[in-house]
Amino acid sequence: MKPMTRTLALWATLAAGLVFAQTSMARELPDFTQLVEDAAPGVVNISTTRVTEGYSAPFGAFSGPEVPEIFRHFFGDRFPAPPGGGGHAEERQSLGSGFVIDADGYIMTNAHVVNGADEIMVRLNDRRDLKAELVGADEKTDVAVLKVDADNLPTLQLGDSDDLKVGEWVAAIGSPFGFDHSVTAGIISAINRTLPRDAYVPFIQTDVAINPGNSGGPLFNLDGEVVGINSQIFTRSGGFMGLSFAIPINVAMDVASQLRDSGHVTRGWLGVMIQPVSRDLAESFGMDQPEGALIADVAPDSPAARDGIEAGDIILEVNGEKVERSDTLPRLIGRVNPDSDVELTLLRNGEQQTVSVTVGDWPEDMAGNANGSDSGNSPTRLGVAVQTLSDSEATQMGVDSGVRVVEIDPRGIAASTGIRAGDVLVSIDHQAVESARQLSDLVADLPSDRAVPVRIYRDGRSLFIALRMGADDK
């Protein structure tokens, strides 16, 4: 065979192999057409309207999305009203997704999609627009349940998110940027992800393209079952960058059941400040490897304090379930019913022992929480959970009012400033702290360009510390 002939034959063989490889790959890629056809009727578009105070300007509207870009660069959306302007109400709208979980009109979405909405509208797959009532929302897990006046709605089949494996194919249907029933697909990148401000959700991480408007929409496995609710993206540009996070459907349905039954969610509470066990800390405690959650402090009068949990304990298991990392503990305790007993396996003074603790109920008036999971609450900027003092407690301390720091995020601003669990916040920036709810307003208004004095009550005496909020903490 001549050299040229041999070369052509070689190229022909390579081309045939490439075609075969592409054909084989095409056969292995999943086909989502049937999944979309079956599931799309149960996916809905959600639009919300929120009325806010604005102003009128004699030379044009300079508020909200109409702010000229040159002014937005300096002032954001809060361009100061020019002289002669008058106040008026403005409507702000946002979009999200959701899906039907009950044929009688119950719909699941994200709490942040409907947070603060004055009106919620649901558009069904058949193009009907229905006004929705908010049954309940849980900001800690970012789950909300809506109700529309309709029946015989198409429902979606629910899967078991505990069976998910890294690497398996998943698909999402939602309304990114308002484009109804858009379909994207990818694989599961990781499971049991804990995000910095969401300690109660073991997120499913995927590379499915998720953008604004997808929030609240379903994540499907290849069997067409809902295994998660698309909730968050990691982005530096505002758009999809290959990292998206979904709430496991098992977690979401437990929350939804409580919201439907009572309108709110109860979760277990220990009342401890925890920190990760580093390799050096593990060695110092005589451990072979870093694991568990190290108790850095115990809140006074908390379930942990009452049942003998001590600072320096390392919790290794909860009811026999291993605590791999410190951020696993809030999730395990949070799903325990209040007033239930849990068996904690812990390391104390180099020896393992088991302690029974009666878990408490997360206090209703707490603002934020120690792990920053309450993303919609202003005190999360501080990274604390607080509880309003009773009148007798305030009298005993010799203060008029205050809130006790029950838990604290070791990565938060409060911890870095020197605030500790057990401290009582008496005043911030010369304003008395009267309740956990009022603290939300005070923290929301703190300046980012200067330090403010914070008066605290600690160990029987008062002292002041300087608190500076970073610009990124607004």
Image (cartoon, grey):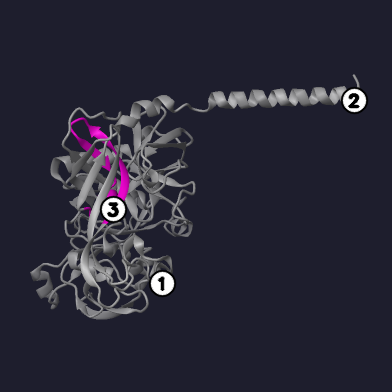
Name the foreground residue: 9 vs 407.
9
Tag of residue 93: 3
Drawn side of residue 339 relative to residue 412, left or right: left
Q: Are marks 2 and 1 in contact (CB under 8 Å)?
A: no
At label 1, the amino acid type is: Phe
Drawn side of residue 220 relative to residue 14, left or right: left
**Rendering coords of residue 181 (x, y %):** 37, 36
Q: Is residue 155 positioned above or below 194 on the image?
A: above
N-terminal of the two: label 2 or label 3? 2
Residue at image position (26%, 80%) is 463
Q: Is residue 330 positioned above or below 467 on the image?
A: above
Q: Is residue 159 at least partly visible in the picture?
A: no
**Rendering coords of residue 2 (x, y %):** 91, 22
Please, what secondary structure does the residue beneath circle 1 have? helix
At label 3, the amino acid type is: Gln
Q: Residue furthest front?
A: 59
Residue occupied by mark 2: 3
Query: For residue 65: magenta?
Result: no
Task: Specify the quadrant of the image occupied by residue 256.
Answer: top left
- Tell which tag, 2 or 3, sits nearer the viewer: 3
Q: Are marks 2 and 3 in contact (CB under 8 Å)?
A: no
Residue occupied by mark 1: 74
Residue range (magenta): 92-117
Badge 3: how crowded within 10 Å, few (<14), some, or many (20+)? few
- Tell which tag, 2 or 1, sits nearer the viewer: 1
N-terminal of the two: label 1 or label 3? 1
Q: Are marks 1 and 3 in contact (CB under 8 Å)?
A: no
Drawn side of residue 404 relative to residue 222, left or right: left
Badge 2: how crowded within 10 Å, few (<14), some, or many (20+)? few
Which quarter of the rendered picture does the C terminus lie within? bottom left
Please, what secondary structure does the residue beneath circle 3 have? strand
Q: Spatial distance from mark 1 to mark 3, Cα to Cα?
A: 23 Å
